[in-house]
Image (spheres, rainbow, N blue to C red):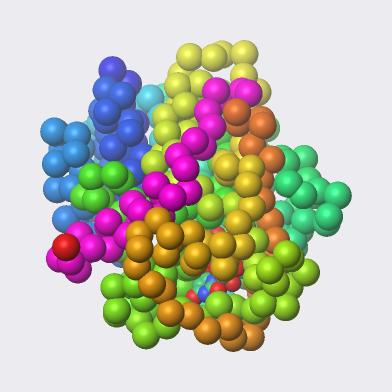
Amino acid sequence: MARILVTGGTGYIGSHTVVELMQQGYDVVIVDNLSNSNAEVLNGIEAIVGRKPDFENADCTNYVEMERIFNTYQPIDGVIHFAASKAVGESVEQPLMYYRNNIGSLLTLLEIMHVFPTKNLVFSSSCTVYGQPDAEHLPVDENAPLKKALSPYGNTKKINEDIIQDAAYADATLNATILRYFNPIGAHPSALIGELPNGVPNNLLPFVTQTAAGIRQELKVFGNDYNTPDGSCIRDYIYVVDLAKAHVKAIERMLNVPEREQVEIFNLGTGRGLSVLEIVNGFEKATGVRVPYTIVGRREGDIEQVWAAPQKANNILGWSAQTPIEDVLRSAWNWEKHLRNLS
Ligand code: UD1
């Protein structure tokens, strides 16, 4: 079976993807420096799959280390590159760290892939590249214009997409799939892996589950004066396990469909927008647990509304996000309970 190298494979989306790959029979080598994840995740993966992935504690920006890893595990049939820093606010305060980390790691990988026989790259991008799409581009498809990034984090995604396009143009043997994620949420149904936010969560779902668990007093809903039906922002929340499965489809396509375009881009979302208040109410309904909240002012840099047109991924990857939102919200709660030893 093919071997896939997964950078950032102990992280949130990475670990769920490793599970799906291994369950489909792939051999997986994880490269992660554990800067925002925990080696315990490897035990969770083993408990779900029944075997351990190979693991290398290394920094993807380190050429010498990455070269050693590529030499050790040949043949490597594909790379999925998740490893990146992802906190928007932190990126505004430490832009150089973000550029060095997020761009340096991709450059290192591409340089190595240029000299090794490994030629298939899947890259984790984000719907952040679309900014706030104009009304005529909602739901947003892959041809919508890209907007100036609102943060260094967002800019690294945009720049990395350009770097991949340029590298592929110069090297006809390089194949890439760029996946633009909408808002990944939830956890594996086993509750053995999930999101591990560092400190106070920035993202909505971890804040909701921590509030439900009593760790946070109340959720602050950032704004109810947007031009949306209930005034709160709208996003396309996609189940992390559905998202992980899309990566397996992307790898399968790169390995088995030679007539694909050299660089393909897919939006990964459900095609349905939900407001912050719909998420809070949906969570309470799905779990029976109350989430106290107050409405506060808008958060700087927030997009009012964005959701995906996922038809390209549906048709070409043969993938769609199918898990009902109630199940997704319940999975997030089950994971929080597992973390806190709540019954
Ligand atoms: C954010 C980033 C996005 C990044 C993604 C990765 C911004 C502007 N965007 O997406 O670039 O790819 O994280 O993790 O930061 N909300 C609350 N209260 C909270 C937390 C969130 O009301 O305590 C609201 C937000 O205003 C937003 C929605 O919940 O409307 C989702 O927020 P979040 O989970 O942070 O995701 P994004 O902002 O969409």
Q: Please indicate whether residue 309 sits to the left or right of residue 250 in the image.
A: right
Given residues 60 and 224, the one toward you in this image is 224
Residue 91 visible at all: no
Q: Residue at x 70, y 61 (%)?
A: 305
* Total numbered labels placed on residues in the image: 0
Given residues 127 and 284, the one toward you in this image is 284
Residue 289 visible at all: yes
Q: Position of residue 59 (x, y in %)?
A: 33, 56
Q: Residue at x 83, y 55 (%)?
A: 135
**Which quadrant of the figure has residue 300?**
bottom right
Location of residue 80 with respect to 92 vertically, above or below: above
Residue 332 is covered by the magenta coloring: yes
Q: Position of residue 227 (x, y in %)?
A: 78, 69
Q: Quadrant of the image for the C terminus? A: bottom left
Q: Ligand 1 is located in which of the four quadrants?
A: bottom right
Q: Residue at x 24, y 50 (%)?
A: 191
Residue 338 is covered by the magenta coloring: yes
Q: Quadrant of the image for the N terminus? A: top left
The secondary structure making up most of the magenta span is: helix
Given residues 215 and 101, the one toward you in this image is 215
| Residue at the right extreme, as displayed | 136
Q: Please indicate whether residue 146 sits to the left or right of residue 278 in the image.
A: right
Given residues 176 and 305, the one toward you in this image is 305
Q: Position of residue 47 (x, y in %)?
A: 14, 41
Q: Which region shows up in magenta?
A: 315-342
Q: Position of residue 48 (x, y in %)?
A: 19, 39
Q: Please indicate whether residue 332 sits to the left or right of residue 133 in the image.
A: left
